[in-house]
Amino acid sequence: MIINLDKNINTNKNMSFKAGMNDAVKRMFAYLSAPNIEDSFKTVYGVDAKFNNNRAAACCAGTVADIFSKLSEFLGVPFSTVPPKIRMFTPGQTLIENVDDAIGFCIPNSCYVLKNEPVFELRSLFFNDKYKTFTDIDRCAEEHYRGGWSSSNHFLHTHIHEWVHNIHTDLLYRLFGYDGTCPMALQRYNSLNGRHYDPNPFISGLSHQIKMQNMSYTPEASKIIKKQISTYAAGETNPQTGKFVGGNPMEVVAEFITKKVTEVLHPDTLMPTHNPFYYNNKEDSLLIDIFLKAWNGILR
């Protein structure tokens, strides 16, 4: 499915923001609580969300859910897709390696994630409970952006980035089917007129996603991605671990969409003011080609 580029949406080209956290946003969030947002997720979306009374994380997640619902109206694509569950984690609590310092992550397949918890369904989202204030989240976003690591300094950057992974994974499974072991996902993605079918294992959404996570770009493509999106989207070797991180189609999609979305958020309401995917000739044609192939799961 290719993103619909609707040119008829009202735009305000002078719209700008500074990291997103201003007095109007603070006043808006002052009336919200983590339990209130949990109830809203359950009532509006049917999502089991638990934020451990972390109001900052809850407000970010609730706002991002609303952002993509609004974008779904603008674009005519299922950007309002929500995850099966949302949970907080603390360093040392997870069964997944190298996530303790992450602000958040999304799981592509069902798996054990938290100690003393059952298997979580694929596309579930997890956010780090050590970031307890908006100042914590805002500071990390600014530091990552100044270092060229992320595509935006908006305090919602990571929450939007992980939500995009959730949406992209859902799209790939709807396009190509699911051949994993999660019973709920098998029912959701592999049912046709009420009858179960097995997807072709050579083109399954899970196979596509695993392959994309292990791909890397040419030096020429990486240079363009790094310049126009972020270092993480282009990929770089971590000097501490020696491991190459980022730099695959899944991260290009997450960082590209995050950048485009944060550029059109109203500074006071945090809602999108117009279609962020209207082509304005700012992006390199090769970058657009890379993004669209990654978005649609077209592998080389």
Image (cartoon, rainbow, N blue to C red):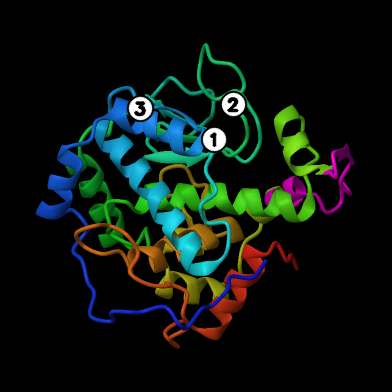
**CA–CA distance between discs 3 and 2?**
16 Å
Q: Which mark is residue 51?
A: 3
* Callout 2 crowding tier (Cα within 10 Å): few <14, some 14–19, many ≥20: many
> Label 2 amino acid?
Phe
Q: Farthest residue in the bottom direction? A: 281
Q: Secondary structure at mark 2?
A: loop
> Label 1 amino acid?
Ser
> Label 3 amino acid?
Phe
Q: Give the magenta range.
A: 192-209
The residue under label 2 is 120
Task: Decide if residue 102 is on the left or right side of residue 28.
Answer: right
Q: Quadrant of the C terminus?
A: bottom right
Residue 75 percent location from the top left of the image = 52, 68
Residue 225 percent location from the top left of the image = 48, 71
**CA–CA distance between discs 2 and 1?**
7 Å
Q: Secondary structure at mark 1?
A: loop
